Amino acid sequence: MSMQKLTGALGVLVLLSACSAGPNFKTPAPLRVDAYTSKNEAVPFVRRIELGKRIETDWWALFASKALNGVVRQVVDNNNDLTSAKETLAQAEEAVKAESGNLLPQASLGAIAGRQKYGAALFGPANFSIPPFTYYELGPSVSWTPDFFGGEHRAVERQQALANYQAHEVDAMYVTLTGDTVAAALDMAAANAEMAALGKVIAEDKTIRQLVQSAYEAGSATKMDILSAQSQLNSDQAMLPSLKQRLSISRHALSIFVGKAPANWVPPDFQLSDFTLPQALPVSLPSELVKKRPDILAAEANLHAASAGVGVATANLYPQLTLSANMMQEALTPAGLFSLTNNAWSLAAGLSAPIFNGGTLSAQKRGAEHAYRASLAQYRQTILVAFRQVADALTSLAHDDEEIVTMTNAVNTASASLDLSRASYQAGAIGLLQTQDVQRTEAKVQLDMIRAQHARDLDCVRLFVALGGSPINPAIQHLP
């Protein structure tokens, strides 16, 4: 065969191997959704919702807390779960390179040294025998299976989609981790504030109990009054251990987030005054959320991998051609390996095609198609769950606004009642016991206000997380 014909034949093989079986992946058409909530549902009114605006910075920076920013930075740099996810991504990227290598010819160098003796039966009736001998072989071999029907190209495509899936999983881990960190810091601040407010309530309880005891000794109160005051004190004191435990849990969680044991690292002592909620909340459009939220992108990558899997299973139904060649030096002494007369070579082409396999290959193709449809349903469900989470966060913030307005009115009423009772006490119209009781009520209202504010703060965090968090700095997507 002339060199021109050989080159032409190889060119045809290369063109044929560029074909790919199975469907070419296309992102499914998005759902037509213009808003997250229905028109008759409540929306936040204390803070402005900027629909269609993307988060341009780290969303937790909107809380204006330097201490929080520092802790989040430590978490991103040192968290073991995030490091593990990045290493898994690096592993997936290497798997793509390994799979891609199967598209190229495979070459190897082999060497053999052995001793052999043939039996007399080898030469039949001639009754001829060869004495034992030592032999040596050395040379390269090359093999290539042209990817005529695109099975290997689809395998590479599938592996790349899986690597993309893992990259989005790193992003999802980043969003979840930063959200959990901010939530733990806010919970610590709320626990500190609630303990301070509860301390005031308990102090009022003790004062009231002492006043009732004095009244009892003066004959103007009953034993039942003393027991009632003591019962109220015990009830409020019983709330304190759970708040202390909340504080400890938040501290321990932050320690683990930064990759430290709770005994070796203590987070800043966050206070509610350390945080300032943004007056405007950027909320991306539903059409943008689908292109941004990591779990949706991961589901899309998983769908892409399933689509490529259909191509792999389809290509397995077709024949495969394998080309091989080797060139060997064969000799009976090591020195003979360098003689041109001992050169041997071979060229071969092998074709294999499935004829009967008990329906295995067809079943594998149908199974791949079912896997694709299952991934498609999961992709659509992931989008719906994302829309629901954003809607939940928005309506929760709306209801938080309503509750805080009500609690603000309650705080103002309680403060006015306290001022009035103090004036009445100074005028001699009421006793000290009634004044202390009003003061205790005002302290309890303040405690309820702190809880309402904390719920609003957490719902704000949930909104940012549901929107997919902030854009991840490319420098932290991959390990150096």
Image (cartoon, rainbow, N blue to C red):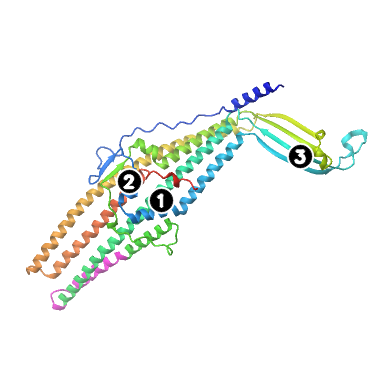
Of labels 2 and 3, earlier in sequence is 3
Which of the numbered marks, if any, corresponds to residue 12?
none
Between marks 3 and 1, how big is the CA–CA gap?
57 Å
Q: Kindly state the secondary structure of the residue where label 3 is placed.
A: strand
Q: Does the magenta-highlighted stretch encompass residue 223?
A: yes
Q: Is residue 132 left or right of residue 8?
A: right
Q: Is residue 153 left or right of residue 286?
A: right
Q: Identify the residue at horizontal 43%, vertical 38% (top origin).
A: 379
* Residue on which the image places disc 3: 138
Q: Quadrant of residue 293?
A: top left
* Residue on which the image places disc 1: 177
**Residue 432 image position (x, y, % from top left):** 13, 70
Between marks 2 and 1, how big is the CA–CA gap?
14 Å
The amino acid type of the residue labelled 1 equals Leu
Report the magenta stretch's main SS: helix
Q: Does the magenta-highlighted stretch encompass residue 20?
A: no
Q: Nearer the viewer, residue 9 or 31?
A: 9
Mark 1: few, some, or many residues within 10 Å (few <14, many ≥20)? many
**Residue 222 image position (x, y, % from top left):** 16, 74
Mark 2: few, some, or many residues within 10 Å (few <14, many ≥20)? many
Dot in front, 3 or 1: 3
Q: Quadrant of residue 423?
A: bottom left
* Residue on which the image places disc 2: 463
Q: Nearer the viewer, residue 336 or 22?
A: 336
Please report the bounds of the magenta region as a residue range: 217-240
**Residue 460 image position (x, y, % from top left):** 30, 48
